[in-house]
């Protein structure tokens, strides 16, 4: 269980919900393992309790933050840029035998055309065909993560390469919530097709980095130019690159003057849980976590993570959110209770 203290000069409210928190990555195609995370995002038909930028899924106690940065009307498809932040951070399966495995890290920047695929990659035994040796690879368990961090799982289907050793090279699968996947891999191992069609018929193409509606209005991401474009082709969000732990994104000012800038700062932490579960704790070194979002008007958001020792400031943290300070100056503080320090030791889920 989490207790949330919301404070600003006008009011102080105590709420009681249950949650864990994690940042998810900025979204282009990702070949990381496709372990399902059913708690994240805003699933269809879920019961949601909204409070400003914070949404609580009453069914599974996920806390979903969505911080709006920039939006622009478009032809058929509007363009938006926001930050998302969701809570499950731990899994019970781990290669080192620990109960919990850290699943977090990264900035949850998201746009209209964001969304990425993740999957499992398996190196198969050597294959000899026509006197030539091959080392085949199998891709399986595809999951699409949409711009709200909601996951859409396409089941256990697989494909692989080379064709001399693995079949098939193409895969089409449907999810249980109206999404359709089409992927093809070539004999060099590169994907030549990676498309996801959502329940409304919009198509996300991970090879072309585009998002198109049923009328072929297209928005997308230019990798060489490091910019997003809207359905008119205008550059609406541009990267200024990353210097150390700081990255900057620019969008056009409403007045038509110089672009406005949003700055993200990561800090490096050691993840070390101390939940007291009987068979192990999670540990991860040199883990970057988002700590500030700087807005154009000089205000911003500050994120503080739960200290393992209970003392602040700390660079050794559990990974769960301790507090978030808003641009208005108000602060939301989380404390964890129930189960074993707020954790269900059986599966790493929030304690009820």
Image (tube, rainbow, N blue to C red):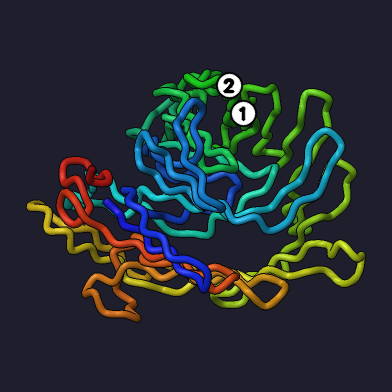
Q: Residue at x 60, y 47 (%)?
A: 28
User: Mark 2 sits on what residue?
Assistant: 180
Q: Which residue is drawn at 26% across and 44% down?
A: 349
Tell me how far mark 2 sits from mark 1, CA to CA: 6 Å
Residue in front for this viewpoint, 194 or 232: 232
**Figure check: 153 above or below 235:** above
Q: Which residue is drawn at 70% across and 27% down?
A: 202
Image quadrant where residue 6 sits: bottom left
Percent coordinates x, y for residue 277 in the rendering: 12, 53
Label number found at residue 214: none
Image quadrant where residue 40 sits: top left
Residue in front for this viewpoint, 112 or 138: 112
**Figure check: 33 above or below 272:** above
Q: Residue furthest front?
A: 10
Check disc 1: other Cα within 10 Å, few if <14, some if 14-19, many if 20+.
many
User: Mark 1 sits on what residue?
Assistant: 196
Q: Tag 1 or tag 2, which sits nearer the N-term?
A: 2
Residue 270 appears in the figure:
yes
Image quadrant where residue 185 sits: top right
Q: Are marks 2 and 1 in contact (CB under 8 Å)?
A: yes
Percent coordinates x, y for residue 190 in the rendering: 59, 38
Left or right, 220 with respect to 276, comes to right
**Figure check: 139 above or below 24:** above
Left or right, 308 with respect to 127, comes to left
Percent coordinates x, y for residue 49 in the rendering: 47, 41
Could you tell me which secondary element the residue under label 2 belongs to?
Answer: strand
Residue 121 appears in the figure:
no
Percent coordinates x, y for residue 44 in the rendering: 51, 28
For the C terminus, which image quadrant? top left
Check disc 2: other Cα within 10 Å, few if <14, some if 14-19, many if 20+.
many
Q: Which residue lies furthest to the right in this view?
A: 256
Could you tell me which secondary element the residue under label 1 belongs to?
Answer: strand
């Amino acid at each position: 269980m989490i207790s949330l203290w919301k404070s600003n000069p006008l009011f102080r409210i105590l709420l009681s919900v249950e949650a864990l928190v994690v940042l998810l990555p900025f979204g282009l195609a990702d070949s990381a393992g496709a372990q399902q995370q059913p708690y994240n995002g805003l699933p269809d038909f879920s019961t949601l309790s909204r409070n400003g930028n914070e949404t609580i899924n009453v069914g599974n106690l996920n806390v979903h933050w969505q911080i709006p940065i920039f939006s622009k009307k478009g032809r058929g498809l509007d363009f938006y840029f926001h930050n998302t932040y969701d809570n499950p951070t731990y899994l019970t399966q781990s290669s080192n035998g620990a109960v919990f495995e850290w699943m977090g890290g990264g900035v949850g920047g998201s746009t209209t055309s964001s969304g990425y695929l993740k999957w499992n990659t398996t190196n198969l035994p050597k294959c000899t065909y026509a006197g030539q040796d091959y080392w085949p690879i199998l891709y399986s368990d595809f999951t699409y993560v949409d711009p709200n961090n909601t996951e859409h799982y396409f089941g256990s289907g697989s494909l692989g390469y080379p064709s001399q050793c693995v079949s098939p090279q193409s895969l089409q699968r449907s999810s249980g919530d109206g999404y359709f996947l089409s992927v093809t891999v070539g004999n060099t191992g590169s994907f030549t097709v990676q498309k996801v069609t959502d329940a409304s018929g919009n198509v996300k193409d991970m090879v072309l980095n585009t998002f198109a509606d049923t009328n072929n209005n297209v928005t997308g991401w230019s990798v060489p130019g490091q910019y997003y474009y809207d359905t008119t082709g205008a550059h609406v969000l541009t990267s200024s690159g990353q210097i150390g732990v700081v990255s900057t994104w620019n969008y056009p000012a409403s007045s038509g003057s110089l672009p406005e800038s949003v700055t993200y700062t990561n800090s490096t932490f050691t993840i070390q849980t101390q939940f007291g579960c009987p068979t192990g704790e999670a540990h991860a070194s040199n883990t970057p976590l988002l700590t500030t979002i700087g807005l154009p008007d000089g205000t911003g958001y500050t994120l503080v993570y739960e200290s393992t020792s209970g003392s602040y400031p700390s660079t050794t943290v559990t990974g769960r959110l301790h507090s978030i300070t808003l641009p208005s100056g108000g602060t939301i503080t989380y404390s964890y209770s129930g189960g074993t320090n707020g954790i269900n030791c059986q599966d790493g889920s929030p304690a009820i």
